[in-house]
Structure formats: structure tokens, C-alpha cells
Image: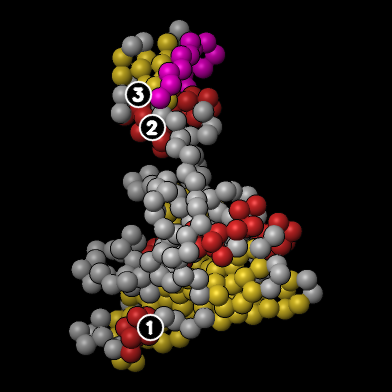
Amino acid sequence: MSEKFFLIKEEEGLRIDKFLKKQFPQFSRNALQKMIKEGLVNVNNHETEPRYLLKKGDEVKISLKEKKQVKVSPDNSIRLWIVFENEDFLVINKQAGILVHPDCNPNIKTLVNGLLAYLPQLKNVGEHPLRPGLVHRLDKDTSGLLLVAKNQDAFLNLKSLFKQRKIEKTYKALAFGHLKETKGKIESYLSRSHKKSNTRISLAKPRKNLKARKAITYYQIEQKLVDPQNIPYTLLSLFPKTGRTHQLRAQLASINHPIVGDRLYTNKLYSNKNNKKLLLHAEKLAFNFKNQYYQFYSPINQYFKMFVSHLKPQ
């Protein structure tokens, strides 16, 4: 932990958390607010709060928590279900329950640990050492197809295809309730929740002073179902055109049809019934690469299949 001192001159009227974010861009604003609340930031030798407005002549001291350097190492115990591989990329059928890459805990086993054991050269591919070769991601409890680049040229090309929305993705999901329209489009703006930093909120329109990104998902109803207690479900095919964090989960929850097993985004109506595994699966990937068309398919996992088999058509 190191101490830094600042004398306020030109920043009068600025919130202290925003001031510190300018000084330390390597830290998120949430992390700096947490330091303030923990008493690691003093103004004129007194503890303060994130919304404090700075005054000219204030003396600010911060006892800075340095970011831990998390290293990811190869691990042969992580099994990889490889669907396809060539000289440029491989496609993996990710199992539900495993993280794709590590966050702040280096002791948690992730898919990346297994990838580095299988392809040591992958450590030099990508934009971040904790995400080698990854051109997109899946949530921990989401199963299905994951695309991994094997060299930097392939990484940049595949990343560009995702950015240009030229990679077609299809997901299967089982949602609570019966959607009215056979097919439709969910268009919203996703923003990080201030109440739960690990979740997103889906807004019909962007709000001032709130960072939000546009998210677009098309859907098609495959089957309307009910369980023995007459609880309604809808089996859906989902076609996301953007790739925002928790996009499908947050958007379906926003229209009151949370995905079965999604405890982060369930609502009061289904909270007592949503204690299953997440039933969201990345089923298809299709794209053109180096003048060749590729299409990959992964059927829903056994748990998903068994759950649906106990439901009856509506």
C-alpha cells in the first residue's frame, strides 16, 4: 500500500471519486469509492465520502491499494471439448459451471488454464494476458460454443468479424412465462447496475449521466410449455446482434421472462421457482473466414434436455 498526496487548486466543486478516477485511471470508480468508504481516503486529515465536493486548498491523501497481479498458468486437469480445430482457430463446446478466464482470484480453475496447457503459444495471442486467444466470452453458467483464435492475425480478423456483426450466433434458452409474439426483437440499452455491480439493467431509452450501450436481440418461440404445477415456460431461439455482457439474461428479465436458473435476474414472481441450473446454451456459430464458410452446432446439454422433457406442450 502506498500513500499519495494532492493539494486541490483547479478542481473545486468536483466530486472526490471523480477526481481520483482522473488521477488513477487504472482503477474503476467503484473500486475508488470502496477505498473511500473503507477510510483509505482523507480530506484535511478527516475521512470523507464519495460524493464530497472538493474545495480549493483541500489536502487529499489516499492510501492506495495496489492491484494484484493475477497470473494464469497451464492446467492439464481442465478438459477441453473441442468441436473443430485448424491452423487459425478452434471451437470449444464449453460446459456449464466453469469460468472462461480468471478475474481477481488466480486459484480458480478456468477454461483458459486448460487452453494454455493444450496450446502454450496461446499466451502471445489476444489483447490481455488473462484472456489469451479469446475473441468473445460466455458466462460461467452458460454452456455451448466458444471461438478461440490460435494466432494474432486470426484473433484480429475474428475480432473484427464480431465487431462488424458478421458472426451469426444462436442461443437456446428456456424462459419463464409465455411470450405473446411468435417472433420479435428486443432493443434496449444496457448499463451497469449501481445496486449490484455484477449485473446489468436494461433500459428502453438511454439516460443522461448513465453510461449505456445499445443491445439488440431477435427471438423466435420454439415451443410453449407448462410443468405439472401449470407454471408456464417458453423454449426460445435467440439471435443476438450485439455482444453485451449479460445481454440475453438482462433483456429477457426486463420483459418479465427471466431465464430459468438465472438467480441474478429473476423477479419476485419466479424467485421461489428459479433454483435450477441456468438454461442458456450457445447453440450455433456461423461465419466466413478466409473465403470459407464455417458453421458449427452444439445440441443442448443433458440437464437442459431432461428439464424440458418433463414439461408438456401448451
Instruction: Tell me the crowding category of disc 2: few under 14, some 14 to 19, or many 20 or more residues within 10 angstroms, Cα based.
Output: many
Q: Residue at x 65, y 55 (%)?
A: 125
Quarter holding the C terminus is bottom left
Measuring 50% from the left and 71% from the top, which residue is drawn there?
80
Q: Quick one: SS at disc 3?
A: loop
Camera sees residue 215: no
Residue 268 drawn in magenta: no
Q: Is residue 227 visible?
A: yes
Task: Say above or below: 113 vs 128.
Answer: below
Q: Which residues are magenta?
A: 1-15
Mark 1 or mark 3, earlier in chain? 3
Q: From the viewer's perspective, is the residue at label 3 or at label 2 nearer?
A: 3
Which residue has dot 2 on it? 33
Q: Main secondary structure of the magenta part?
A: loop
**What is the distance, in whole Å, between disc 1 and disc 3 at their CAs?**
49 Å
Q: Position of residue 263 (x, y in %)?
A: 30, 63
Residue placed under numbered mark 3 in the picture = 40
- Which label number is shown at residue 302? 1
Q: Position of residue 161 (x, y in %)?
A: 69, 64
Q: Amino acid at mark 2?
A: Gln
Structure colour scheme: secondary structure
Using the numbered discs, state the Cα–Cα distance from disc 3 to disc 2 in whole angstroms.
10 Å
Instruction: Please indicate whether residue 271 sits to the left or right of residue 238 in the image.
Output: left
Identified at 47% across, 60% down, the residue is 75
Between circles 2 and 1, the one closer to the viewer is 1
Element type where label 1 sits in the image: helix
Callout 3: few (<14), some (14-19), or many (20+) C-alpha neighbours within 10 Å?
some
Magenta-colored stretch includes residue 8: yes
Residue type at mark 1 is Gln
